[in-house]
Amino acid sequence: MESTIVRTIHFTCIGKGHGAPCPPANKEDWERLRREPWLAEMCARIEKGDEELKHRLPVWTPHCAEFKNNHRSIADAIKPLNRLMLDFDEKGHTDEIKARLLEKSPLVPLLIEESVRRGTHVLVELPNGMTVEQAQELMKEATGFTPDAAVKDVSRCIYMVPESHTRYVSAKLFEVSEDDIFSIEKNPKFLDSLDNKNSLDKNNSLDQNISLEFKGIPYADIISEWWRRNGGEPAKGERNVKLHKLAVNLRAICDNKKEVLFQIMPRFGLSDTEIKSVIDSACKEEPKGISKLMQQIIDALELGISSDEIDDAEATAAETGVKVNVKNLPIGLRESLVGVPVSMHLPVLVGIMPIAGAYADQVDVEYCDGNIHQLGLMAIIRGAQASNKSVVKNAIDVWKRQFDEEDALARKREEEWKERKKSRKANEKAPDDPHVLIRQVPVTVSCSTLLKRFKNSAGHTLYSFGEELDTLRKTNGAGSWSSKYDIYRLGFDRGEWGQDYNSDAAESGVVKVAYNWTMLGTDGALRKCFKSDNVENGLSSRILVAEMPDSSFSKMPKFKRRSAEDEAKIQEAVTRLRSFSGLIDVPRLRKAIEDWVEAKRVEAAKDIDHVKDTYRKRAAVIGFRCGVIFHLLSGKEKESKACLDFALMMADYCLQQQIKVFGSVLQNQYVSAQDECQRYGVNHSIFDQLAPSFSRDDLRALKHDCSDSGLRNIIMRWKRDGWIEPVDRQHWKKTSQCPIVPTSH
């Protein structure tokens, strides 16, 4: 009796990449993915020569409908199918192969499609009792072309291609009968022909408890990056040699265990016996530890970057003191760094923080001191001419698309109103002002227009992006610049601002200032905006500054375009930020920032560093707000460790940059005002250099350019904090409460 055909939910498995998990998928999943515009764009770019992009294509499994734990391997195949995918490498013959098979095919074709490199994929039913070799020979005779013998094991996957590549698809592709599920009794030769008999045997020798990860990184990802750095996957004739080299390098991160290597090594059509031979040969060599290339690959994968850039990442970390872990970034932030050199990761992240905060403008959050904050942020990206600051603009252009679309409609309404108002007759009543909400304003906006935008903002945050800080400075000359300074300063905490004119020509009123912005500029323009007479007014401590890498005498950096999928993810992140409202509780983040700001207080107090003491307070606020954005994007109920690390990284970087850019100017103000000496860095702590018991003369020797009143103030602060106690009028000793500055995050 024939088995009844049942339309099942799953006929294949789909993974986001070659080494990603492969969960079961149905017809709708498969067809939906093939219709994605970003998939068509990726394949078009690969065809034009962007080979590295191929490894980011999604994959699907034609020979299996389900794997244990979604792990694509022979040993974990739960529902292998009596189907065979044939891969014809000859380019441009898909239509010819299709015509021949539809006219007279020896096997039932289920799918005929053009591969990403213009070869041909043909999926057929494999009759009971027929081996793969027999099927391949029949198809060779029918098509006139030789199929690749490597595409045959149960776990094999192929890259997904767009719907436009499909030449023929049978309804049977999505139908699974009992006969389609692999059975040893019905087809004993099938296992042998797929070289997986031992692997699928219930009593096989593979240890199912073997970890398939190293330091949390899937071995599949390590192997994929290894092939990329070593000329790609092996072709026929070089499989044994390349697999041997791979095994030699992998054993260093597998404790030289053959059973682990046997489970993680790719097959490329080789039998288990051949793979074991390769592994035995590799493990006979004298162990030499992890090779430099393998270490680079692991370090890079831990950070989520290409192993080609690991040296640049280490150099950037050494220069800035912080390291960006791209792998741990949430949706939106991660895609913003696609195609961006690692030395520019921080400037891009800094640049998008204000617009991300503007999108999440309905969020309130309690800070460490108990006050309620919103996500007010301002950023300046500084760098020399031609230092590639445009990389920040490119990311922001994607982020502000939703603002662009909404503002375009609002501006059109406003322009129509202006036209009606202008063209009305003398005795005709003026049309009512539509009071449109426009959230993006140019940085050169007048104070009067800005006030109008605030009045119509309906409680939303406005945002500006400026490509040239120098243009802003020239436009906002003299007194106007001072007014803008006040507005920016108030925008950090949504303070009140307004103006009152006895004229209808100018806007009047009082508003809450909710205004975020990002500006690009040279160091010269930044110095002109923040001179010694205005650094003290508080704006410098409210700004998150990022520095572009020094491009002097350096090679041209390589950029890559974001895919349509990456840009779609950024839009998803924007939508997610806009969906949040009300009070968001982040207790773990509050505690982390509170500990950080206290550690910086101790550092500043030991050094009597007024500059660090000034900037640490708002650097903590800025880092905290960046951490809130990370948390919102992560979609997790509680703040993750990655979120806390990110917030502390941004606080560290903010403090470092503020001191670097504004510190000397602010210090001169303190010296002039308080007659105290120049600041010392963290590595020259005055307090730590003093002996357990010391005199005023010992302190004067270290702070030789301080006045007597300055020395008295220092001693009074230390005594007030309980760090020292008097021995007599001229001598003091350190107490047990003397703090030890924790190592930097």
Image (cartoon, grey):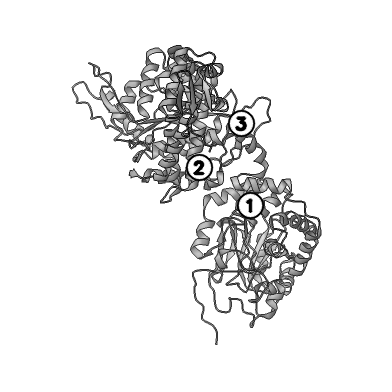
The answer to whether marks 3 and 1 mark residues whose Cβ atoms lie closer than 8 Å is no
Residue 55: mark: 1
Picture coordinates of residue 517 (x, y %)? 43, 29
Picture coordinates of residue 569 (x, y %)? 49, 47
Label whose residue precedes the other's in the sequence (2 or 1): 1
Label whose residue precedes the other's in the sequence (3 or 1): 1
How far apart, in angstroms, are the residues tagged by discs 2 and 1?
Answer: 29 Å
Picture coordinates of residue 501 (x, y %)? 25, 17
Picture coordinates of residue 527 (x, y %)? 51, 17
Assign a secondary structure to mark 2.
helix
Using the image as rendered, state which of residue 741 and residue 96 is in the foreground: 741
Using the image as rendered, state which of residue 170 and residue 61 is in the foreground: 61
2 or 1: mark nearer the eye: 2
Is the residue marked by circle 1 packed among few (<14), some (14-19), or many (20+) residues within 10 Å? some
Give the residue type that dot 2 points to. Asp
Q: Which residue is mark 2?
A: 645
Using the image as rendered, state which of residue 214 and residue 76 is in the foreground: 214
Label whose residue precedes the other's in the sequence (2 or 3): 3
Give the residue type that dot 1 points to. His
Tag count in the figure?
3
Compared to residue 668, the image places residue 256 above or below, namely below
Give the side of residue 215 with respect to residue 729, left or right.
right
Compared to residue 564, the image places residue 415 above or below, namely above
Residue at horizontal 43%, vertical 50%?
A: 635
Quadrant in which the N terminus appears: bottom right
Residue 319: mark: 3
Give the residue type that dot 3 points to. Glu
Is the residue marked by circle 3 packed among few (<14), some (14-19), or many (20+) residues within 10 Å? few
